[in-house]
Image (cartoon, grey):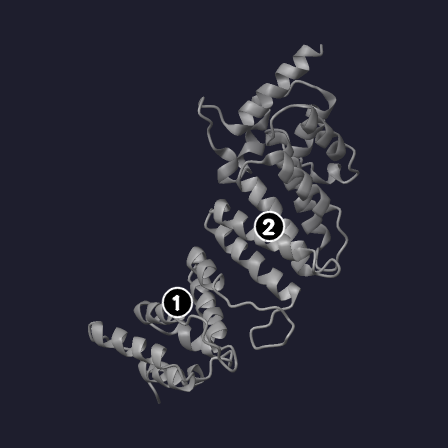
Amino acid sequence: MPTVQESISNLLSNLHSPTLTTQWSNLTQSSPPQTLRSISVSTLTAMHDQNAIEAVKDMDMDNVQVLVDIVKNVGTHNFNHAEDNILRRTLYQYYLDNSSFSTAAEILSTLRILPPSPPTPYSFTPSQTLDVYVTVAECYLEDDDPVSAEVWVGKAAGTVSSVEGLTTEVLRFKSTQARVLDAQRKFLQASSFYHMLSLTSHPSIHPPDLLLLLTKACTTCVLAKAGQRRTKMLTQLALDERLPSLTTSSPTGSSVSDIVLAMYRGEIVDIDDTKEFESTLEEHQRARLSDGRTILSRSVQEHNVLALSRV
């Protein structure tokens, strides 16, 4: 039964890459002797076998890092089965399973992606390419890094027009777009995206998910700065026949639908009535501004000033 070290050496030998073999040898010789778990990893010698993922899961982090270093130095070397890409996906899954989302994103972002024509082991369809870009963005969002996520949403935006139909990948792209705008506190834009998604009919989106998207649309609209554009968005939400479904029977405060309706009608909103709603906000939505106010309190105060001016 081969050790991890022996299996990786076999892998590099099968890849016919002297450069990679030398690097692996140098890395193992320069590192302190380590006890590697003796596990059944024969599938690691052929990385196109999905069982390789299970093998890497059982490796020590130091040795996984060696694999990462090897991937970084593959360069433009072509392999018969795109083994370097499969190794990248394997490492991506390893870091994802360990909740190292940014590292998982970095690994996945190095996938070699070529057009579908002429066909090669590295060919990706537009839908497959979109899936990779969106997945990278999703990983960065899990680590609260909307700046990096936005970069990959931008890459995805350049691909989505080549995907035919409203596929699951396209829906994930639109959802990730909304989440990035939300995380960057571009609440009005996020609200519009969430609301459009909440009106989407697709087998992969279930009715409870549509209501959750509507809730997100309402939440981000309430948090947006007061003004004509928000008033227009409030109108769309207030006239949505599904809005009453978001109402919660609670004596301690107003639900998001109550607040949306109050703002739409131009009524004064008591900040004390928003405490329960505020407890449902995500961390970035509860941030304090430079003047010490929360985003919600600023929004409510701006709304109340406008409401009073119309009395």
- Looking at the rendered structure, the secondary structure element under dot 2 is helix
Query: Residue 272 falls in which quadrant of the image?
Result: top right
Query: Considering only order in the chain, which callout, 1 or 2, is on the residue closer to the N terminus?
Result: 1
Residue 176 marker: 2
Image: 62 above or below 192: below
Instruction: Identify the image quadrant of the N terminus.
Output: bottom left
Q: Between label 2 and label 1, give the one nearer the viewer.
A: 1
Closer to us: 31 or 291: 31
Q: Position of residue 286 (x, y in %)?
A: 50, 34
Closer to us: 31 or 278: 31
Q: Position of residue 135 (x, y in %)?
A: 55, 59
Q: Position of residue 111 (x, y in %)?
A: 50, 66
Closer to us: 241 or 164: 164
- Residue type at mark 1? Lys
Q: Position of residue 52 (x, y in %)?
A: 46, 78
How many residues crowd mark 1 within 10 Å: few (<14), some (14–19), many (20+)? Answer: few
**Position of 18 compared to 141: left or right?**
left
**Position of 39 compared to 188: left or right?**
left
